[in-house]
Amino acid sequence: MNWLLGLYREVGAFASRQGDWVLPTLARLVFAAVLLGYFWASALTKLDGPFSPSTGAFAQIFPKAFEAVGYDVGQLGLWQRPVVLVGSWAELVLPLLIVLGLLTRLAAAGMMGFVLLQSLTDIYGHGAAAGAWFDRASDALILDQRALWLVVLAVLLCKGAGPLSADRALGVEPTRLAA
């Protein structure tokens, strides 16, 4: 039995030593495979040009306000246009930064805020069902799915981009993390 416990401890110690490079590398790979295309496709529906938001962008980001003004963009307040532009550009730039591993912690924090705002807009603005945690079903589009997105982003926020990144190449991230 002692042999088995010793083996367990050795495997655990080996896995712990690998966490500083495996977790951020896998988190960026999973983000690229699962979310990069999603966010870019979404952002591109919101822009008619670099500084020209589409009408649909206002419907996606400010659904109740847009409906209240009879779907007339000209009737919206002054702050909605910059919010739509900044949000659309954030949806393009932040995922790219994460995939490149450039300013990764900042990009991950920004994406976490973006996902939280997106989720609140979907629930309160569009009336999407949030789902429930601890309900034996893992398919709720808001709570279950986006919680997993936030965990991937939390790994990047806490661990950085990992060794194969622009952050490491530029010296922004330490080559060896302190214990």
Image (tube, rainbow, N blue to C red):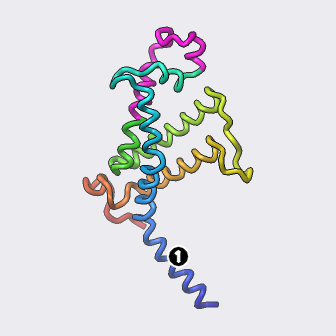
Residue drawn at point x = 43 percent, y = 42 percent = 37
Asked if residue 82 is among those painted magenta in the image, a careful observer would answer yes
Q: Nearer the viewer, residue 108 or 100?
A: 100
Helix, strand or loop at label 1? It is helix
Residue drawn at point x = 44 percent, y = 53 percent = 156
Residue drawn at point x = 49 percent, y = 37 percent = 114
Horizontal side of 131 relative to 6 (left or right) equals right
User: Taking the image as drawn, is residue 142 in sight?
Assistant: yes
Corner quadrant of residue 171: bottom left
Corner quadrant of residue 7: bottom right
Q: Quadrant of the C terminus?
A: bottom left
> From the viewer's perspective, is residue 42 above or below residue 33?
above
Outermost residue on the right side: it is: 135
Q: Nearer the viewer, residue 98 or 138?
A: 138
Segment colored magenta: 64-90
**How far across and how far down the image is residue 107, in percent?**
40, 44
Residue type at mark 1? Gly
Horizontal side of 41 relative to 173 (left or right) equals right
Q: Which residue is mark 1?
A: 12
The secondary structure making up most of the magenta span is helix
